[in-house]
Amino acid sequence: MYTTSIVLSSIEAVKKFVTLTNSYTFPINLTTDKYKIDAKSIMGVFSMDLSQPVTIEVPSDEGKDFIAQLDQFKPVKQN
């Protein structure tokens, strides 16, 4: 299982992310300390607290191409 933090800070980012997740057949989940939702559900994604980074879970044996596309959603590091 591959996990990393992502930021979905706008409606456009959520739409782009959900469109991306729906182009893959393997399960993709978003988690917080309290919840785990299907990342392919736009309603589920919008039900999360998106003011903070969320953790994405991807099966590492299937998701190499998908994982490579997650850079656009990674938090920007501030100095």
Image: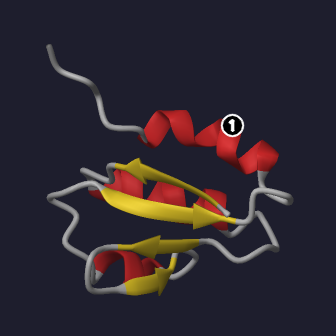
Report the residue that reaches farthest toward the front. Answer: 1
What count of labels does the image hold?
A: 1
For mark 1, does the 10 Å Cα neighbourhood hold few (<14), some (14 to 19), or many (20 or more) residues? Answer: few
Image quarter (top left, top right, bottom left or bottom right) of the N terminus: bottom right
Near-viewer residue (16 or 45): 45
Question: What residue is shown at x 42% (from left), y 84% (from top)?
Answer: 36
Image: 16 above or below 36: above
Q: In this rendering, would 62 be left or right of 9? A: right
Near-viewer residue (70 or 62): 62
Image: 39 above or below 12: below
Q: In this rendering, would 28 be left or right of 66? A: left
Near-viewer residue (37 or 1): 1
Image: 55 above or below 76: below
Image: 57 above or below 76: below
> x, y (%) of residue 51?
14, 59
Question: What residue is shown at x 33% (from left), y 61% (from top)?
Answer: 54
Q: Residue 32, located in which quarter of the rendered image?
A: bottom left
Image quarter (top left, top right, bottom left or bottom right) of the C terminus: top left
Question: Tag 1's secondary structure?
Answer: helix
Q: In this rendering, would 45 be left or right of 77? A: right
> x, y (%) of residue 76?
29, 28
Q: Residue 75, located in which quarter of the rendered image?
A: top left
> x, y (%) of residue 61?
85, 58
User: Which residue corresponds to mark 1?
Assistant: 68
> Amino acid under label 1?
Ala
Q: Residue 37, located in which quarter of the rendered image?
A: bottom left
Question: What residue is shown at x 41% (from left), y 61% (from top)?
Answer: 55
> x, y (%) of residue 9?
25, 50
Question: What residue is shown at x 79% (from left), y 46% (from top)?
Answer: 64
Near-viewer residue (52 or 24): 52
Q: In this rendering, would 53 be left or right of 45? A: left
Report the residue that reaches farthest toward the top. Answer: 79
